[in-house]
Image (cartoon, rainbow, N blue to C red):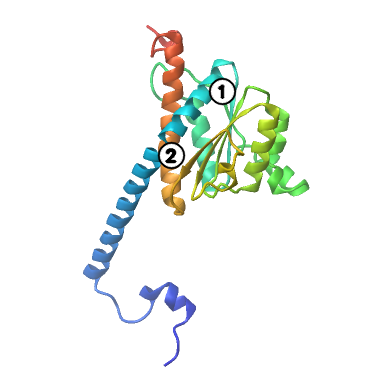
Amino acid sequence: MTSKSALEILYPFLHGKEQDPAAVDARLLHSIEEKARESRETSVRFFAEQAPVLLNAAKALAGVYRRGGRMFTMGNGGSSCDASHVAVEFLHPITAGRPALAAINLTADVAMTSAVANDVGFEHIFVRQIIAHGRAGDGLVGLSTSGNSANLIAAFVKAREMGLTTIGFSGGDGGRMASGICDHCLVVPTTSVHRIQECHVAAYHILWDLVHTLLADDRGSAVSKDFAA
């Protein structure tokens, strides 16, 4: 008997006799249930463990805006989409009465990132921008499911040298981002990239809400005077 090919092992449903559609659906429905359960359990554990870190990060970021600073965001791949999402949430708040807050997405400038990556290396694409645009009192938020992205680490190190507040979103054991590289590091306790990213989305939405709540408390009202009737 010959051994199965690598393709057959990876994709067994492509080989052999036709499968019973009802049986296939049952397995897939079970898979959905398991993934949803895993997502819920990971989220519950993450927020139970990381709520104090999230609150402290929100206080620190509110302090950045209170002092007239700006927030920069960064990430790679799917996390670059999250970096964009974080920035737009602060720039364009969808809740009535909440003012826009300065946020700059460092993944947005394709010409800049490709030029730096081509000329001096991909690990420099964020640090070059922080050197050019960052100033003491600003904030830097970076997302990495592993916590080990070299370009994020380089930017975090330089940002702290320059006096920026640094906030990291990571997963697994937190990687290098959780070893003191960041002032605040939120770590999702799983190695599943999907579960990590799901928790990151929920966490930065809560971060956004907490920052606005803290700044509203400074004004003595949840509604900005600029938006008051």
The residue under label 1 is which amino acid type? Ala
Q: Can residue 67 be seen in this view?
A: yes
Q: CA gap, disc 1 to disc 2?
A: 20 Å
Mark 1–mark 2 CB contact (< 8 Å) = no
Decide: few, some or many residues near mark 2? Use Cα within 10 Å; few <14, some 14-19, many ≥20.
some
Q: Where is residue 86 in the image (x, y as percent from the top left)?
A: 50, 33
**Along the polypeptide, which appears first: circle 1 or circle 2?**
1
- In the rendered image, the quadrant that contains the N terminus is bottom left
> In the displayed structure, would residue 88 be above or below residue 10?
above
Frontmost residue, 19 versus 176: 176
Q: Where is residue 128 in the image (x, y as percent from the top left)?
A: 72, 37
Q: Position of residue 32 (x, y in %)?
A: 30, 56
Task: Say whether residue 43 is left or right of residue 115.
Answer: left
Decide: few, some or many residues near mark 1? Use Cα within 10 Å; few <14, some 14-19, many ≥20.
some
Q: Which residue is drawn at 44% across and 18% down?
A: 214
Residue designated by label 1: 102
The residue under label 2 is which amino acid type? Val
Q: Seen from this angle, which residue lies furthest bottom? A: 1
Q: Which residue is drawn at 34% across and 42% down?
A: 44
Frontmost residue, 211 versus 122: 211
- The image's mark for residue 201 is 2
